[in-house]
Amino acid sequence: MSPAASRPMAGEEADGAPGGERGCAAFRRQDALLRDAERFVFREARLADAHDYDAWEALWTDDAIYWVPGEDADADPRGRMSIIYDNRSRIATRIKQLKTGKRFAQTPASRLRRLITNVELLGRDGGDLLVGASCMVGESRERGTTLWIGDVQWRLRETPDGLRMAAKKVVLIDHDQELPTLGFLL
């Protein structure tokens, strides 16, 4: 999900302003899409904070990618180091491991709280909706509290069951530095 894939929404000028005769209707559609996207990302955050792994996993499409870049946030993750680069199968494996209660890095599970802000529509990539936001995750463990801060991009797909994540990319502000163990869902 590169910035190059971001394009203005239908009926929108490059600066985000409604355009043309259908500007009001297009603006209302865009506003409704934004509200739907906000509800989705807030729900995703709530489920992850609550360790509701089954409900969180159900938010993904079958071809999903979950990516937390390492040294270079814009590099091809297949050829560069990533903190997390999971396909759908690996997401399911990660969830199974967390649910066993035997994952050392998450025994006991971290107490988490996510703050999601500045949610905006970035455009479309094919039929998928690109959504961006700023995020801060507070993680409380025996070692103390760690703040994980970064930008998140979601590629959301409209399905008969509602929006689903086709991709999630979390770029931590300190992604290129030494990090403590990241054993939870970011």
Image (tube, rainbow, N blue to C red):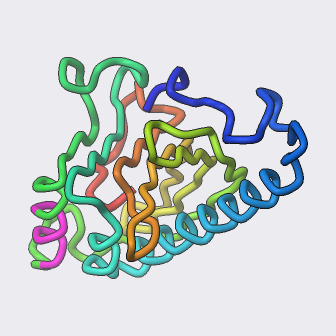
Verify whether residue 96 appears in magenta: yes
Bounds of the magenta segment: 93-99
In the picture as drawn, the residue positioned furthest to the front comes out as: 21
Verify whether residue 87 appears in magenta: no
Q: Nearer the viewer, residue 121 or 111?
A: 121
Where is residue 75 drawn, in percent x and y?
35, 18
Q: Is residue 21 above or below residue 53?
A: above
Q: Name the image quarter holding residue 150.
A: top right
Q: Is residue 26 left or right of residue 53?
A: right
Residue at point 13%, 53% (across, down): 90
Q: Is residue 149 left or right of residue 97?
A: right
Q: Nearer the viewer, residue 66 or 36?
A: 36
Q: Is residue 152 left or right of residue 66?
A: right
Where is residue 157 drawn, in percent x and y?
42, 56
Where is residue 99 drawn, in percent x and y?
16, 78
Residue at point 42%, 20% (across, down): 74
Where is residue 158 drawn, in percent x and y?
45, 61
Q: Is residue 171 above or below residue 107?
A: above
Quadrant (top left, top right, bottom left, bottom right) of the C terminus: bottom left
Quadrant (top left, top right, bottom left, bottom right) of the N terminus: top left
Q: Is residue 80 above or below residue 52?
A: above
Q: Nearer the viewer, residue 26 or 172?
A: 26
Circle count: 0
Q: Main secondary structure of the magenta part?
A: helix
Residue at point 49%, 61% (across, down): 145
Residue at point 14%, 64% (across, down): 92
